[in-house]
Amino acid sequence: QTVTFTSSGVVYLSACANLLSNNAYLLTADIVNVNRTCFIANNQENISFNGQGHLVDGIDALNTYGFYVLNNSRNITIRNTQVTDFHFAVNIDQSSLVGIYDFTALSSSHSGIMHSYSVSDTFSNVTSSNNTNNGFWCYYSNSSTYTGITANGNGNVGIVMTGCSGNSLSS
């Protein structure tokens, strides 16, 4: 497991980590067979994470997330990452201004992306397919934008909106 800090403000990762405010992260290798939540941003802000096309792979363990953004985290960007075999690939909870771009969530044991009690988030060019329940689950989240979404082959439905309002969905 390697975490390398540089003077340029970029943090190079090849292992799971807590994501801290005011940092740019680059994933440098695939991470496989993770048995816990991999990347956590808890009450953090101004984070950019670029997976550079790498895989983050779990073992379908209950209550694990590839990415967990929670507790008033804001201005978090996650891009260019493929996440497989977690309970949820991404869980965004009580946060705002989170952006998920060019992202793939596959084979989650519950849903690909959970988006709860959050506002003004953006999902662009996201595939969330072949998950046990749903591709996307919006739960009381508002004013978010979904563009270029693919959510097929899920056990229940592609996109569920429970108590969500003011969201925009377009191709």
Image: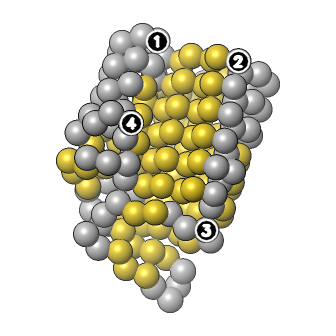
Element type at marker 4?
loop
- Residue 68 lies, with reference to residue 161, above or below; the image says below
Q: Nearer the viewer, mark 1 or mark 2?
A: 2
Distance from disc 1 to disc 2, alpha carbons, whole Å, reads 16 Å
Q: Which residue is pictured at 54% across the width and 80% down the height?
A: 9
Does label 3 or label 1 sit earlier along the sequence? 3
Residue at the disc numbered 4: 63
Q: Nearer the viewer, mark 3 or mark 4?
A: 4
Does label 2 or label 4 sit earlier along the sequence? 4
Distance from disc 4 to disc 1, alpha carbons, whole Å, reads 20 Å
- In this view, the residue in front, 170 or 92, is 92
What number is the disc on residue 163? 2
Residue at the disc numbered 1: 157
- Residue 111 lies, with reference to residue 103, above or below; the image says above
Structural crowding at the residue carrying mark 1, measured as other residues with C-alpha within 10 Å and reported as few (<14), some (14–19) or many (≥20): some
> Marks 4 and 1: CB-CB under 8 Å?
no
Q: Which residue is pictured at 60% across the width and 40% down the height?
A: 93
Q: Which residue is pictured at 20% across the width and 47% down the height?
A: 33
Name the kind of residue labelled 3 in the image: Ser
Q: Position of residue 85 (x, y in %)?
A: 28, 36
> Marks 3 and 1: CB-CB under 8 Å?
no
Element type at marker 1?
loop
Element type at marker 2?
loop
Residue at the disc numbered 3: 21
- Residue 7 lies, with reference to residue 18, above or below; the image says below
Q: Position of residue 158 (x, y in %)?
A: 48, 16
Does label 4 or label 1 sit earlier along the sequence? 4
Judged from this view, the residue extending furthest toward the left is: 33
